[in-house]
Amino acid sequence: MTEATTPTNFIRQIVAADKASGKHAGKVITRFPPEPNGYLHLGHAKSICLNFGIARDYAGTCNLRFDDTNPAREDIEFVEAIREDVRWLGLEWAEQRHASDYFEVFYRCALKLIADGKAYVCDLDADEVRAYRGTLTEPGRNSPYRERTVAENLDLFQRMRAGEFEDGARTLRAKIDMASGNINLRDPAIYRIRKQAHQNTGDAWPIYPMYDYAHCISDAVEGITHSLCTLEFEDHRPLYDWCLDQINLPAHPELAESIVAAGLSYAPSRPQQIEFARGNLDFTVMSKRKLMALVQDGLVDGWDDPRMPTLTGARRRGFPAAAIRLFWERAGISKQNSVIEYGVLEGCVREVLDATAARRMGVINPLRLVLQNLADDHIEVLDFPNHPKDEAFGRRSVQFSRELWIERDDFLEEPVKGFHRLVPGGEVRLRGAGIIRCDEVVRSAAGEVIELRCTLDADTRPGGSGADRKVKGTIHWVDARSAVAAEVRLYDRLFDVADPDDDTDGKTYRDHLNPGSRRTIRAWLEAGLAGASRESTWQFERLGYFVADRHDHTAAAPVFNRVVTLRDTWVKPAK
C-alpha cells in the first residue's frame, strides 16, 4: 500500500500559479488555526492535511496557531491535546503561535482604525445591535453612537482597555456600511468587554478582539500567504479584506513592534483567503458543542472514546494516522459541500492495516475442541508466518496441544447450504495443523454445546503424505493451554442513522445513539499477544483488525479494541 500521489485541486492550482508568478515573493506560508475549546475531530484533519500538505509540496512552511481570543471557552487541556493530535498525524509545524501573542498588536491596530475614522465605540446592547442590523432583504440602521468624534472614541476605547466599564456595556465596531448586502459588513463588532482571565495573559486584558478581526491580523503578522478556511467563512472574506486594507500592516511595522520585542519573527504579508468545503462524514456529528455534551453527559467514555469522531478517539480505536491522511487525500478538495460515507474511511483503514499489521490468531466467541487421538500431555510448536504477503515480518512459533479454542460460529449441528466449516461427522482443516473430523458433540445440562471431540488426521499434518488433501473449509484456533484471556471491545458506529443531525422527525442526535455501538467480551488469544505494546495493531485472522488499548492494556490484563472488521459488513441496527 502506498499513499495517494499528490492530488490536483483548485487550491493547489492557485498556489502553483502564485508561486510561478512571484506573488508573495514566491513564498508559501500556511497555518492551521484551531480554537482551543475542544478536541480536534476527523473533519479538522482535512484542514490539517491540506495546510501542511500545501506547505510541504510547495517548499513552504506551516504554523500551528491557537486562536485563543475567547477565554471563557478555552483551556490549556485542549491546547496540549491539539498539539499531540497534529504530531500523531505525522506533521510538524514551523512555529507555534497564539492569537494572544498579538493582543497588543490588535489593540494598536484598533487605535489606528479609530484615528482614521474607521471604528467607533457603541453603547447598544446585543439585542439592540440585532434590531439595528436589518435583515437579508432590509438594510440596517446606523447606531446612534456612530458619529462620535475620533477623540471621544479614543477616550472611550482606552477606558475600555483600562477596565472602567462592565461586561457588555460597550463594543468597538468597524464603521463600514449598514446598508451592505453582506450583513457581515454592517458595522461588525471588533472588540468586546469581557473581564475573564485568559490562559496565557491572565487578567491583563479586560477586552478581547472578535475572531474575524483578530484572525486576519494574525495571518498578516505571521506572513501567511494563503489563508485556507472552510466555506462558512466565504461571506466573511470581504470583512477579512477590509480589515487588512484599512490597517495595511506591512506599511506600518510600528503597529507590531511588540511582536519583535517578544522575540517572535515578524515579516508581515497581505494574505489571501481561499475557501474550501469542509469534511463531512455520515453516521457522525462534528459539532464541538454536541461532542462536548456527549462527554459531559456521560453518553460516551470521554473525548477519546473509540466511538467518538475525535482524532484522539480514532487513535484509541486504532485508526492509523496514515489511513486518515490517505482518506482526506482521496476525498479531495472542492467548493461543493458533500457527505462522505464512513465506510470509505474504514476502507482506507483496512488498506493501511492489511499492509502493516502482523497476523495472529484469536477466538472471540470460544468453543472448546478436544483432539482425542493426541496424548493428554501432547505439546508441540508450529511455525507460522507473521504476514502472508511480506516475508520481512518474519515468522513465529505457536504452541499446539490436545485442547483448543475455536470460534463457535465455525460449528453448526445442522449445516445450512454453503456452510463449509465444522459439522458433526464432517471435516475441516485447522489452520497450519491438519485436517480434523468432528466425532462427538458434548452438551451442558441446559443443552448448550460446550465441547467438540474430534480426531486429527496425522497424514494431513504439515509434511505428511496427505498434507495436500482437499477439504472445503479452513478455520483458525488458539491453543487452550497457552492462550491468554483478554478483554476485547467490539466497537461500532456511535449513531444508527446516517444523518444524526436531521431533526425533521422531531428527534435529536441523542435519540439516534446506537445501543450496540460497544460490546465487551472475553476472548482467548495467542500467548504472545499478552506482551503486545500499547497501540500495536494486529490482524486477528478471519476476524478483523485489533489494537492494544493505549490506556488499559497490560501484560497481566490484555485489552484489545476492534479497529474494523476484515470486510465492510455494517448493517443498520433494527429499530
Image (cartoon, rainbow, N blue to C red):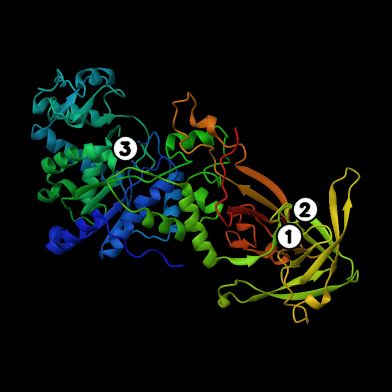
Q: Which residue shows up at 49% across the image and 28% down it?
A: 508
The reply to whether discs 1 and 3 touch (Cβ–Cβ < 8 Å) is no
Q: Nearer the viewer, residue 225 or 574?
A: 574
Residue position for label 2: 412
- Label 2: element kind: loop
- For the residues marked 1 and 3, what is the alpha-carbon distance in whole angstroms? 72 Å
Q: In this view, does 224 lie to the left or right of 197?
A: left
Disc marking residue 421: 1
Q: Which residue shows up at 22% across the image and 37% down it?
A: 236
**Amino acid, disc 1:** Arg
- Label 3: element kind: loop
Q: Percent from the top left, x then y, of residue 101?
A: 29, 47
Pick out the residue farthest to the front.
Answer: 417
Q: In this view, does 398 lie to the left or right of 176?
A: right
The reply to whether discs 2 and 3 touch (Cβ–Cβ < 8 Å) is no
Residue position for label 3: 204
Q: Residues within 10 Å of mark 1 (few under 14, many from 20)?
A: some
Q: Percent from the top left, x then y, of residue 454?
A: 85, 64
The reply to whether discs 1 and 2 touch (Cβ–Cβ < 8 Å) is yes
Note whether 189 is above or below 20 in the view shown: above
Q: In this view, does 137 lie to the left or right of 442?
A: left
